[in-house]
Image (cartoon, rainbow, N blue to C red):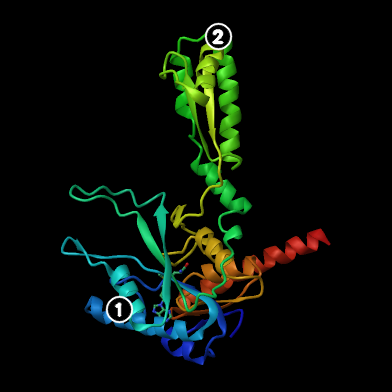
Amino acid sequence: MIDRIIEGDCIELIKKIPSKSIDLVITSPPYYKQRDWMGIGNEETPEAYLEKILGVFHECVRVTKDTGSIIFNLGDKYHEGSLLLIPYRFAIEALRREKVKLINTITWVKTNPTPRQFKRRLVQSTEPFFHFVKSDNYKFNLHSFMSGEEARTERKRRMKNIGQRYFKLIEEAPLSEYEKEMAREELKKVIEEVKEGKIKEFRMKIRGIHAPAFGGQEGGRKIQMEKQGFTIIRIHGNSMKRDVIECAVETLKGCPHPAVFPEFIVRELIKLTTDEGDIVLDPFMGSGTVAVAAKKLKRRFIGFEINPEYCKYAEERLKSVENASQKALFECS
Ligand SMILES: C[S@@+](CC[C@H](N)C(=O)[O-])C[C@H]1O[C@@H](n2cnc3c(N)ncnc32)[C@H](O)[C@@H]1O
């Protein structure tokens, strides 16, 4: 089964996996009545749907090692204008039924939700990832979470507009041309420091725009403002590792699957909870995102998917990742 995507019903297939053999289960089951899925998702009532998801969850808990993690991502559903709170009903029932702890609810903030404004409600643009563990001895590689090149690029992208308002304020300030030039140069430098993660954030105070600072350490800043026209306050400290991931909804060219996991989120969570060589299971593999992420991070994987079309696409997607890595190896040797 290892390193394969197997076509079939996960409710049956997962029974073939030995107990306590998986390091991480990370999955996104079909959401309730969101699409005409094969398999789970079209049950008459939320209760019937949740029973099925909880049945799969029970098996996921069984196959997970005591040091492992189980991460479930679920979406909600409106019924007659009200949210059904499906994800939270699942999480509450999962905690009640199984011997697990819920250590985090990681919120995915979608930076590009479907642009459709409702007149009487706000656009839903978040989804929870529930992180369950079986013991206090779970693997947790905090240092590798959101710290790679990709996370830095994502951070830089989000920080594209950081500090830009100060450029406008410098222009409007009653400073000499020389002072304005100095202020712009220092501002560019400090913006780079934030983007590189060297400092957490900063504030700029400009003479004639901001109130002068008073007393103590602030006294030095007051003198700086008077003499050079501005002062910059650097705020140090490591960025906290928070339970929020900002990331765009992904669409893959030629992909027949309508609801693909963002690979970035899956990769960050695999790095957080497993080591190289560990086994990752996705019982609802869809387009193969978990397999692709696991492969790229040198983890092994098992995937189940009931829809033959998605299965075929996932296998092709995986092959192209394997080919790309072989090509890179060949070019390096
Ligand atoms: C929300 S999608 C998962 C998407 C996936 N995370 C990705 O990145 O493409 C849920 C998937 O579960 C599959 N599915 C539904 N019932 C299933 C079952 N009983 N066994 C296996 N797969 C099932 C659906 O066909 C669908 O592809």
Residue toward you, 140 or 176: 140
Indicate the position of residue 314 as horizontal and vertical percent values: 53, 72
Up the image or down, 162 lies above or below 87; here it is above
Indicate the position of residue 49 as horizontal and vertical percent values: 29, 79
SS at mark 1 in the image = helix
Up the image or down, 155 lies above or below 249; here it is above
Indicate the position of residue 295 as horizontal and vertical percent values: 63, 69
Identify which amino acid the numbered label 2 is placed on: Glu
Residue toward you, 252 or 160: 160
Total marks shown come to 2
The residue wearing badge 2 is: 177
Task: Specify whether tag 2 is near ligand 1 (CB below 8 Å).
Answer: no
Residue located farthest toward the front when viewing the structure as drawn: 216
The residue wearing badge 1 is: 50
Spatial separation of the CA atoms under disc 2 and disc 1: 66 Å
User: Would residue 119 be found to the left or right of residue 250 on screen?
Assistant: left
